[in-house]
Amino acid sequence: MARKMEDDKKMREWCREIPKIELHAHLNGSIRDSTLLELARGLGENGIIVLEDVEPVILKSSRTLPECFELFDLYHIIATDHSTVTRITKEVVEDFASENVIYLELRTTPKHNEAKGMTKDSYMKAVMQGLNNVDEVEVVLNSTQTSSNEEPETVINSFGNEIKQTRKIHVRILLSIDRRQTTESAMETVDLALKLRDSGVVGIDLSGNPVVGQWSTFLPALKYAKEQGLSVTLHCGEVPNQEEIQAMLEFQPERVGHACCLDDSHWKLLKSSKIPVEICLTSNVRTECVSSLDDHHFADLYNEMHPMAICTDDCGLFSTSLSHEYYIAGTTFGLSRDELYDFAKNAVKLSFVEDKVKKELLKIFDSYKR
Ligand code: IMP
Ligand code: ZN
């Protein structure tokens, strides 16, 4: 028993220590619980929310689906303040870096709120300011950015290799289209993404409540994004809407998130098309898109060597971390450390970053485990 606990602890530490790539993380879903609580208390004191209603939900470590949606509403109130958006961005990037995420593709929905003087542009400025404010680690937003001259620290890692530990995280941004948006608003988001290309924006995501909105509403904007050379990923199959799933797969996005509720024909189509899947284990179980971890489609896709990446989705909302997602993937599906490491490395190829950075990231993986 004691031996098992010791092995378990070592496995958790190993999952934390290895370099990792995060490809599916929503900014506001990744807020630290302590920050969320502090901000909610402030809103409560100002009479904007009734703290007693949300505090018990924030303090819980495991939340039901309706409680998750309660928190999404709170996130929307919180994210209307520019300085708060800046603070959350800084903290989220620092949290990912602290668990050895070396590349983070962070997605967020640019928000517009006239009463608060917030436009989609000013929201994104606040996000960019947050990236600038990160001081625990160097944030690299494009491949032309010159790195600091700081001498990297030499450490011995758990493979027994001497490695240079650079305190650096590459970050790229995806702008999310919320399923509640109109075609016009979705178009605006794509235009903003194009404007911010030099600032690290590389693509577009479609997300939000999966039972809201029609595919035909978003299609013009998604097509436009593709034509303009932006990468596109879609939340696909969170609910069993087979007509929409068919249309999404025919659209051939560069990646899809989740892919839970596909019928047999779409399952075959997904596999033959080789569209990479962003796998969010904890999120899928919590939101009841899959009945249990053991029943998750990860195992089937893994056995077929389908391209996939392990991701968090909303590490604040679901009380998880990328290290924990690797840990549960390894322990649930019986992956060895070597297999998990190769899996982590393969995620580099699925990222939307420039080839030059991909090469740099692959080098880090190779030097880490020789
Ligand atoms: P934000 O875009 O930075 O505000 O991140 C939170 C938003 O991401 C939520 O309001 C949803 O629109 C979206 N989101 C987060 N998790 C999920 C999910 O599991 N399914 C669909 N949309 C999600
Ligand atoms: Zn998501």
Image: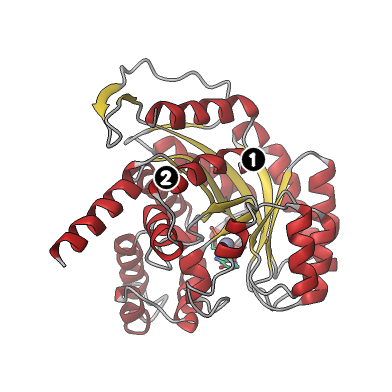
86 with respect to 17 (left or right): right
Give how far across and how far down residue 359 sits, in percent. 57, 26
Instruction: Say which of 324 and 44 sits in front.
Output: 324
Give how far across and how far down residue 293 sits, in percent. 47, 72
Give the quarter the ligand 1 occupies: bottom right
Q: Which residue is mark 2?
A: 93
Mark positioned earlier in the residue sequence (2 or 1): 2
Question: Hey, what amino acid is under mark 2?
Answer: Val
Q: Is mark 1 within 8 Å of ligand 2?
A: no
User: Does residue 111 appear in this view?
Assistant: no
Instruction: Say which of 72 and 205 sits in front.
Output: 205
Instruction: Say which of 89 and 332 sits in front.
Output: 332
Q: Is mark 2 within 8 Å of ligand 1?
A: no
- As displayed, is residue 243 above or below residue 352? below
Circle nearer the viewer, 2 or 1: 1
Instruction: Say which of 322 and 298 sits in front.
Output: 298
**Label 2: few (<14), some (14–19) or many (≥20) C-alpha neighbours in 10 Å:** many
Q: Which residue is mark 1?
A: 352
Residue at point 78% right, 54% down? Answer: 273
Residue 133 location, quadrant: top left
> The C terminus lies in which quarter of the figure?
top left
156 with respect to 293 (left or right): left
Give how far across and how far down residue 328 sits, in percent. 40, 62
298 with respect to 161 (left or right): right
Residue at point 55% right, 63% down? Answer: 299
- As displayed, is residue 237 above or below residue 137? below
Query: Colour mode?
Result: secondary structure
Residue at point 62% right, 60% down? Answer: 301
Question: Hey, what amino acid is under mark 1?
Answer: Phe
**Label 1: few (<14), some (14–19) or many (≥20) C-alpha neighbours in 10 Å:** many
At numbered mark 2, what does the secondary structure look like: helix, strand or loop? helix
